[in-house]
Amino acid sequence: MHENHRQRMRERFLKSAPDTFYEHELLEMLLYSAIPRGDTNEYAHLLLERFGSLRGVFEASPESLQEVRGIGPSAAVSIKLVLEMMKRYAKDLNAPVVCYDKISKIVSFLHPRFLGATSEQVHLLLFNNRMEMLDASVVSVGSVNSADVPIQDIATKALYTKASHAILAHNHPHGWALPSAEDKHVTERVRVAFDLFKVNLLEHLVFSDDGYYPIMKQEYGVFRSATPLGQLCSDFYHDFYDIDEESFRFPPLFSN
């Protein structure tokens, strides 16, 4: 009987608005995973009676929670886990949003991620239409001087992230920030793949220990159009490249 009740509750939650549920019903379902068998509806009512509200339940100590009948260590962990997740969710909501509309911001973000790397790494940054970062990940790690770029995987990742713009970056450990013929070939293949998903490859950056090189800028120009997707006007690119990579050098890590 309890299993059928739990299944009906789960289906109801998925099919209806969550805010139509009473507090004891939400707490009841939260306890399902921690209490595989038993009437968690009863335990939810006991918790609310003891602590007065959902806030009181979540803020109660693990020891106090386990004083309630039916609540063991697993259930106490589940309840405290929700509180920790809510705290981090609130922190994310209140975090300042950075707009990565300048190459200098992106270079400053990426450069520390290559420090100390002895192998070539490929990084992918994904952005929404406002150039707010949606995701930053390492998509490939290679040998000292090579790394395969999983084009299908990164294009699919951009699609599922619902990104509008992407930046690819890789490093040349102990080398020059100059692209090879293969680097340029990969750039074009990635650009074409992203176009199919309506994602604009904004730039492919090559990093060395003290500098960087923008392949897209050099291959397609500062005043290039927004690509066939028409997502960015040409003025964006002019403002985007706010530093000159030919004269730019990262400051030394250590100075006398």
Image (cartoon, helix red, strand yellow):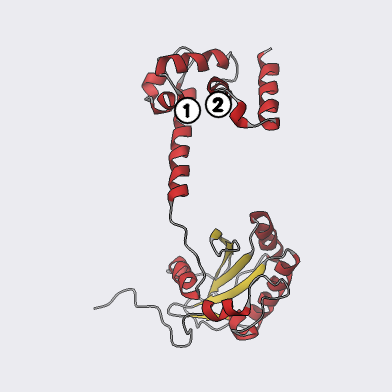
The x, y position of residue 211, in whole percent, is: 46, 80
Q: Which residue is mark 2?
A: 30
Q: Residues within 10 Å of mark 1 (few under 14, many from 20)?
A: many
Q: Check disc 2 and give the amino acid type.
A: Leu
Residue visible at 58% across and 13% down?
A: 39
Callouts 1 and 2 close, C-beta under 8 Å = yes
Q: Earlier in the sequence, mark 1 or mark 2?
A: 2
Q: Which mark is residue 79?
A: 1
Depth check: give the residue in front, 46 or 153.
46
The x, y position of residue 124, in whole percent, is: 58, 65
Query: In what element is the residue under mark 1?
Result: helix
Residue 13 lies in quadrant: top right
Residue 42 drawn above or below residue 151: above
Q: Is residue 29 left or right of residue 96?
A: right
Q: Is residue 158 left or right of residue 88?
A: right
Residue 104 drawn above or below residue 131: below
Any part of residue 253 in sight: yes
Q: Which mark is residue 226?
A: none
Depth check: give the residue in front, 10 or 90.
90
Q: Check disc 1 and give the amino acid type.
A: Ile
